[in-house]
């Protein structure tokens, strides 16, 4: 997938999210619909990811918590685009998380987030990580919005 097919590329995402290597887990955004509270991000999983050095080096599997973080970051971009650009989404709760398929080097995760509730104080998203048409992980993620200058 070329960078031209992204709504936001990695360089633009770095300007939106307060993360940097190795914790910026989104390579691009391919779809966003502000009115419907929907976004799709992309994570290209490569064998060079730093977590594969220690997370089963002989049988590399992406840690589930990092899949959840990638989903949360995707939701954070949606929140930013809804006009809360002076705030940071801080994780409050993850519920109903399920891991359905191991994520391995070479996989491309499509990170779907749907805002259930988003306001000036926080919100909740339903999130799914897909590999092609196969569900890899899903969760409901609740967050608080905090003023950047108060952190």
Image (tube, rainbow, N blue to C red):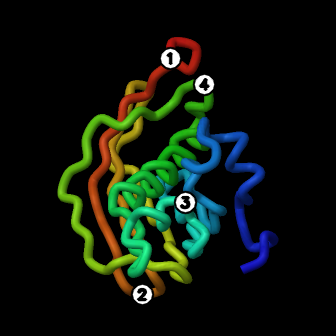
Other-residue count near label 4 (Cα within 10 Å), few / some / many at <14 / 14–19 / ≥20:
few
Mark 3 or mark 1: which is in front? Answer: 3
Extreme residue in the bottom direction: 133
Depth order, front residue of 123/93: 93
Query: Exactly how many numbered labels are in the figure?
Result: 4
Do the numbered discs 2 and 1 sit on residues whose CB atoms are within 8 Å?
A: no
Label 4's element?
A: loop
Which residue carries the number 3 mark? 50
The disc label shown at residue 133, or none: 2
Which residue carries the number 4 mark? 86
Mark 4 or mark 3: which is in front? Answer: 3
CA gap between label 1 and label 4 equals 12 Å
What residue is shown at x 23% (from left), y 60% (from top)? Answer: 97
Mark 1 or mark 4: which is in front? Answer: 1
Mark 1 / mark 4, whichever is N-terminal? 4
The disc label shown at residue 151, or none: 1
Other-residue count near label 3 (Cα within 10 Å), few / some / many at <14 / 14–19 / ≥20:
few
């Amino acid at each position: 997938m070329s960078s031209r097919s992204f709504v936001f590329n990695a360089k633009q995402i770095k300007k939106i999210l307060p993360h940097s290597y190795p914790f910026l887990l989104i390579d691009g955004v391919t779809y966003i619909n502000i009115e419907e509270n929907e976004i799709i991000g992309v994570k290209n999983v490569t064998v060079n990811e730093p977590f594969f050095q220690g997370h089963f080096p002989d049988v590399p599997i992406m840690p589930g918590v990092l899949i959840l973080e990638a989903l949360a970051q995707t939701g954070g971009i949606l929140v930013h685009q809804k006009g809360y650009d002076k705030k940071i989404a801080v994780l409050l709760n993850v519920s109903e998380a399920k891991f359905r398929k191991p994520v391995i080097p070479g996989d491309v995760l499509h990170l779907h987030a749907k805002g259930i509730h988003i306001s000036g104080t926080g919100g909740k998203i339903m999130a799914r990580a897909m590999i092609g048409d196969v569900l890899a992980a899903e969760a409901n993620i609740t967050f608080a919005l905090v003023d950047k200058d108060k952190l």
